[in-house]
Image: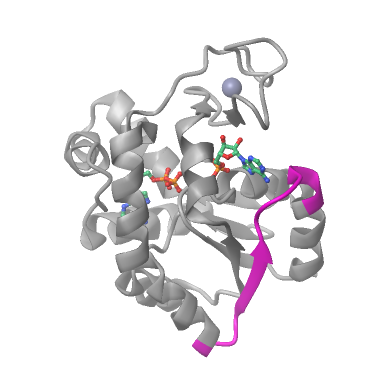
Amino acid sequence: MKSMIVLLGPPGSGKGTQGEKLGTELGYVRLSTGDMLREAVRNGTELGKLAKTYMDSGALVPNDVIIGLMKDKINALGKVPGIIFDGFPRTVEQAEALDKELNVDLALNLDVADDILIERLTKRRSCPDCQAVYHLVYNPPKCEGKCDKCGAELYQRDDDKDATVKNRLEVYRKNTLPLVDYYTKAGKIATLNGVGDINAIFEEVKKVIQ
Ligand code: ADP
Ligand code: ADP
Ligand code: ZN
């Protein structure tokens, strides 16, 4: 069983959706840099103030900031059955830094075409309290506008609006796509079709982590 798993794939490819299911099923810890940064923004910390200026335009937060944050998180975890990295690493420099901390077993790359990504992101709704994600059409909450898991009111992330979404896809291509090559060379990549029924994709995900 693979225990150190990196979720690759463009924004909207389903990293959060699949990562959450996997974490619950296997008892692994999911570390999402996006969730951490949004929490920092909500709490108005120094990190949050800095990160917001980048996040609002869809740019990446600087490597040194993210690497420092993740090192602290990993060290604070102690011994756990496994970790799912969601949204990290996003650059080759971040991947090299992660390799110094632990041995990545698998980089799971979710493949989804751009037009589908845009439709997913612009109709995504997120829970501010428990970080669950929904989709207005493909994965709607049971009760409109409310989180199934905790009842909080769902919101649309600022960076899920049209203009920012396009920029995030470009940033992905330029900075994060090279990681597919990076993990392919390391013999650690598995690419899955990220289009289709969420549960059917999850079955494929479980097969590759065996
Ligand atoms: P990421 O973490 O990679 O940005 P998310 O898991 O947040 O992606 O998914 C983006 C959006 O697409 C969400 O609204 C989610 O509900 C929806 N979604 C995820 N997987 C699928 C799928 N297989 N089919 C349709 N919509 C999906
Ligand atoms: P997505 O749904 O696109 O996968 P995330 O929630 O992972 O989005 O990230 C949202 C934003 O947070 C990014 O656009 C970026 O500004 C910042 N961010 C998250 N993770 C990283 C990272 N590893 N390196 C740099 N910036 C990051
Ligand atoms: Zn919730």
Specify whether residue 196 is painted magenta.
Answer: yes
The residue positioned 51% from the left and 60% from the top of the image is 9
Q: Quadrant of ligand 3?
A: top right
| Quarter assignment of residue 140 | top right
Residue 62 appears left or right of 161: left
Task: Reply above or below: 17 against 171.
Answer: above
Q: Is residue 164 magenta?
A: no
Whether 167 is drawn above or below 185: the answer is above
Name which residue lies at 21% across and 57% down.
Answer: 62
Q: Which residues are magenta?
A: 185-200
Residue 90, x across and y down, in percent: 38, 62
The colouring scheme, among rainbow, by chain, secondary structure or one colour, is: one colour
> Residue at image x 78%, y 47%?
25
Viewer-proximal residue among 53 and 40:
53
Quadrant for the N terminus in the image: bottom right
Q: Is residue 84 left or right of residue 75?
A: right
User: Residue 43, how many percent across, how many down?
Assistant: 30, 25
x%, y% of residue 159? 33, 35
Residue furthest to the front in view is 115
Which residue occupies 46% across, 42% down? 118
> Measured from the top left, where is residue 124 in percent x and y?
52, 31
Q: In front: 203, or 119?
A: 119
